[in-house]
């Protein structure tokens, strides 16, 4: 459930926020939904190059 998600504050220049909103609306997403989508794509890209991030990796941070 979305209410159970941890909160994360992000400070960005207004121009970036406006452009994010433009892209989100174009893709029929909310800004949060667009950010989640972008994060998932970046993680996929990273894991494709470096291998799957495991629970062990996360615990060793």
Image (cartoon, helix red, strand yellow):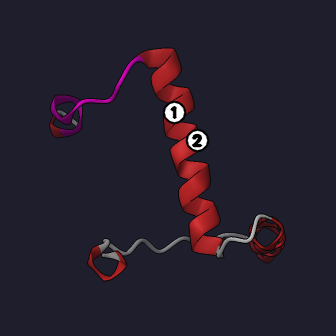
Disc 2, disc 1: CB below 8 Å?
yes
The answer to whether residue 11 of the structure is visible from this angle is: no
Task: Reply above or below: 50 against 18.
Answer: above
Residue at horizontal 54 percent and vertical 70 percent from the top: 10
Residue 47, percent from left and from top: 45, 25
* Tag 2 residue: 41
Residue at the spot x=47%, y=74% of the render? 9
Asked where in the image residue 17 lies, by quadrant, the reply is: bottom right
- Toward the viewer: 7 or 30? 30
Q: Residue at x 60, y 61 (%)?
A: 35
Measured from the top left, where is residue 28 in percent x and y? 74, 71
> Can the viewer see residue 40?
yes
Which residue, as the protein is rendered here, is positioned at the far bottom? 3
> Is 57 one of the magenta-colored residues?
yes
Q: Nearer the viewer, residue 40 or 10?
A: 40
Which region of the structure is painted magenta?
51-58
Q: Is residue 14 left or right of residue 35?
A: right
Who's the residue at 58% across and 68% down the image?
A: 33
Depth check, front residue: 27 or 36: 27
User: Which numbered marker is on residue 60?
Assistant: none
Report how far apart the C-alphas of labels 2 and 1 lie in the structure.
5 Å
Q: Which residue is mark 1?
A: 44
Mark 2 Cα-neighbour bin, 10 Å: few <14, some 14–19, many ≥20: few
What element does badge 1 sit on? Answer: helix
């Amino acid at each position: 459930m979305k209410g159970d998600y941890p909160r994360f504050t992000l400070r960005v220049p207004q121009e970036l926020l406006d452009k994010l909103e433009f892209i989100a609306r174009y893709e029929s997403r909310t800004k949060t939904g667009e950010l989640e989508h972008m994060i998932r794509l970046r993680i996929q890209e990273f894991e494709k190059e470096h291998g799957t991030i495991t629970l062990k990796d996360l615990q060793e941070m």
